[in-house]
Amino acid sequence: MNPDMGEPLRLSYWAWSLSDSGCVGIDRGGAATAPAPLEWQAPPAELHLKRDDVHVWRVNLTLAPLPYLALRQTLSADELARAKRFVREGDRQHFIVARGALRDIVARYLRAQPGQIRFRCDAHGKPSLEESCSATQGSASELQFNLSHTDGLALVAIASGRRVGVDVERIRSGISQDMIARSFSPQEQQVLRSLPAHLQALGFFNCWTRKEAYLKARGEGLTLSMDSFDVSLDPGAPVRLLNVRGDADEPARWMIVELPPGPGHVAALAAERLLEGELACTATLDDFCGCFSAR
């Protein structure tokens, strides 16, 4: 790597939990689909987010009643109204915990109270912090974040000065051919069909999470269709944004990284490159661990 390009992007994996007293604890996740043997760590008391950092938080959405109520009290009226739209009580509770955990995590970086955090959405629906929320926080004005949750599990990506997107899904069978045809490019469909039958569900969700993470990081909503770009999906192959039709330089602007959410799940992170040729590396409390093939 060119020494003039600075440090590579460092990924830190933090496990979020909230006890009845509001203290941080450890919620260790497995790594059945992990590209490297990593454990989710308890975060340090003081969080420092540099330009070459991306922090990914893992959240268990099933909480005891007291922590759940504590998180619920931090949500805005709009968030509570959105929660009421869920038909199933379990889905409603998971939404509340995911939003409450997002508030708690963002508040730690801003050194604020979770209930003081105010979000806004742009024209395409991508959330960000209101200017009044971060104007007095210095570098926090550049705080970028993204949330994804499914089936009792959530991931939150945090970065400074670079766009990020994250997606997590539970691996399941029975995916319709119509969904594949509508969502995947012809090249991706061909690769998926070429996989052995026992790997096709994993290949599908590899592709889906990587595409969703990239779309969420771009933040352009439905203006960018899912079949207008290609990602790798073959289990064990390098994780990459392969092609974006109409913009040959776009793949070089992004890193796609496979995340280790836990058994039965697949997840991906898309992070904007700030340096040409920037690599994605993993970091924990034990510091540098190794590099993913993310070029």
Image (tube, rainbow, N blue to C red):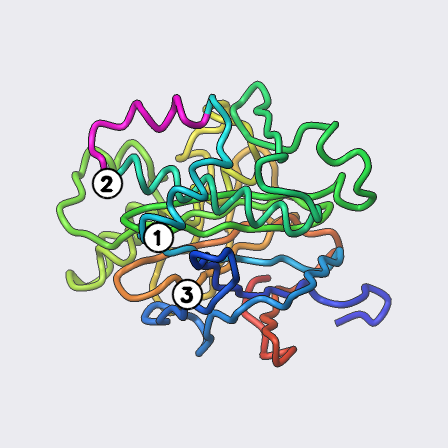
- For the residue carrying disc 3, how many other residues have a C-alpha within 10 Å: few (<14), some (14-19), or many (20+)? many
Q: What stretch of residues is rendered in magenta? A: 79-90
x, y percent for residue 92: 30, 35
x, y percent for residue 169: 32, 50
User: Which residue is under mark 1?
Assistant: 153
Query: What type is the residue that disc 1 sits on?
Result: Leu
Q: Is 294 rendered above or below residue 163?
A: below
Q: Main secondary structure of the magenta part?
A: helix
> Residue at 61% of width from left, 76% of height from top?
285
- How far is the residue under mark 1 from the one under mark 2? 12 Å
Q: Is residue 250 left or right of residue 199?
A: right
Q: Is residue 242 left or right of residue 163?
A: left
In this orientation, which residue lies closer to the viewer: 87 or 30?
87
> Residue reaching furthest right?
4
x, y percent for residue 93: 31, 39
> Residue at 45% of width from left, 27% of height from top?
79
Query: What type is the residue that disc 2 sits on?
Result: Gly
Please, what secondary structure does the residue beneath circle 1 have? Answer: strand
In this orientation, which residue lies closer to the viewer: 227 or 81?
81
Please, what secondary structure does the residue beneath circle 2 have? Answer: helix
- How far is the residue under mark 1 from the one under mark 3? 12 Å
Query: What type is the residue that disc 3 sits on?
Result: Pro
